[in-house]
Amino acid sequence: MLNNPKIHSCKVYNSEKDKGAINWGKTIKRSTPFKSGNSWIYTDFIRRHNINHDENELTLIHKWSIKQAIDLLSFISDDFPLLTDDFDTQLTIDDVKDIALKLYPKITKDREIYIINLILQLINEKSEFDLSAIYTKNFNLIWEKALQKTLGHNEFLKNKIPKVKWNDVITITEALHISPTLNAASPEVDIIFQTESELHILDAKYYDIFNNKSRPGLTDLWKQFYYGQAYKAILEIDEIPHNGFVFPCYMPKSDYFIKKFASVEFFVNLKNGSHNKLTEIPAYVASLQLVLDAFIYSESIQNKYLTEIVNN
């Protein structure tokens, strides 16, 4: 007699090309894996689709450029068939141009800048914006270093800022297994220098105050306030140092260097409904071109800075 055959339940899956990156966290949590040989695999994936508007537009023009590139390759060889399903697009050249020129001044990732540049070359359209260090993701470091060198940053004064150290009660921390912290730390002053009459403390900032309307957060504001109070006490000077935030800017006139566009007021509310102003810290925009040129050619612009802030 023949043995009864073993019955296996099988599921048939159609292979489809999905869009979006796999969200492995949600996939593992919500989907059931299947045994394949000695391994467990997932046949259903949860994918990410929550990309913001700018990223979506960048993807659209990226797909358009790939389609155009494949079209051009088809003139050379038949070995590159056009995959219309994967790269189908309804964008016109004018659409691509408008999107690219809109995104160009806002993007900060190197690879995105490179893609936009290639796309603009593909449509034979020179960008309205010069490719500059301002568009690199580490521009904040370049901006700080350039201001330090051109304004005469004083490292000796910087090191006068108070250090902060945890003094652990060793018997207690060891008994409770609290990790020790032995190294002393101090706040990092971006730019500090002293003239005959005044101490200057500047915070180099790179926020997109033009497009995204972003400004320094409360922690940065209080840090700069602290610098002024700390150095006034340390150096035993009568007046609070000249504090300020400095943002890069393409100036409308080539002879402009630094302009005050706002100030941050620190105050406390009084019982009678009025408020007592403690201090006010100015916020400046400074010429990107002038600062970087002076940085490259090792020129000082400290005197120009002193002259222009007096007139602001």
Image (tube, grey):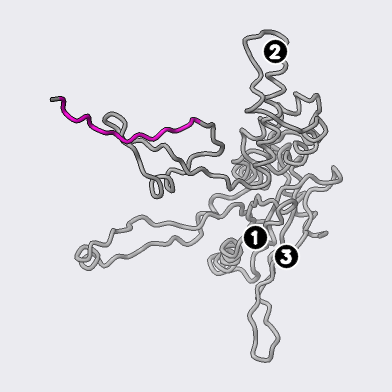
Tag in front: 1 or 2: 2
The residue drawn where x is 51% and y is 43% is 47
Name the secondary structure under disc 2.
helix
What residue span does the magenta drawing correspond to? 2-15
> Closer to the N terminus: mark 1 or mark 2?
2
Q: Nearer the viewer, residue 189 or 78?
A: 78
> Closer to the N terminus: mark 3 or mark 1?
1
Q: Which residue is mark 1?
A: 199
Question: In the picture, residue 39 is in which quadrant?
Answer: top left
Check the picture and name the quadrant holding the N terminus.
top left
Q: CA distance from mark 2 to mark 3?
A: 59 Å
Judge the density around disc 3: few (<14), some (14-19), many (≥20) Cα neighbours within 10 Å.
few
Name the amino acid, label 3. Ser
Q: Which residue is mark 2?
A: 74
Q: Nearer the viewer, residue 238 or 167?
A: 167
Name the amino acid, label 1. Leu
Judge the density around disc 2: few (<14), some (14-19), many (≥20) Cα neighbours within 10 Å.
some
> Closer to the N terminus: mark 2 or mark 3?
2
The residue drawn where x is 63% and y is 38% is 136
Name the secondary structure under disc 1.
strand
Q: CA distance from mark 3 to mark 1?
A: 18 Å
Residue 168 in the image: state x and y as whole percent. 29, 65
Q: Which residue is mark 3?
A: 263
Q: Which residue is outermost to the top?
A: 77
Question: In the picture, residue 189 is in which quadrant?
Answer: bottom right
Q: Which residue is outermost to the left?
A: 1
Tag in front: 3 or 1: 3
Give the number of marks. Answer: 3
Q: CA distance from mark 1 to mark 2?
A: 66 Å
Q: Nearer the viewer, residue 165 or 50?
A: 50
137 up-or-down from 87: above or below? below
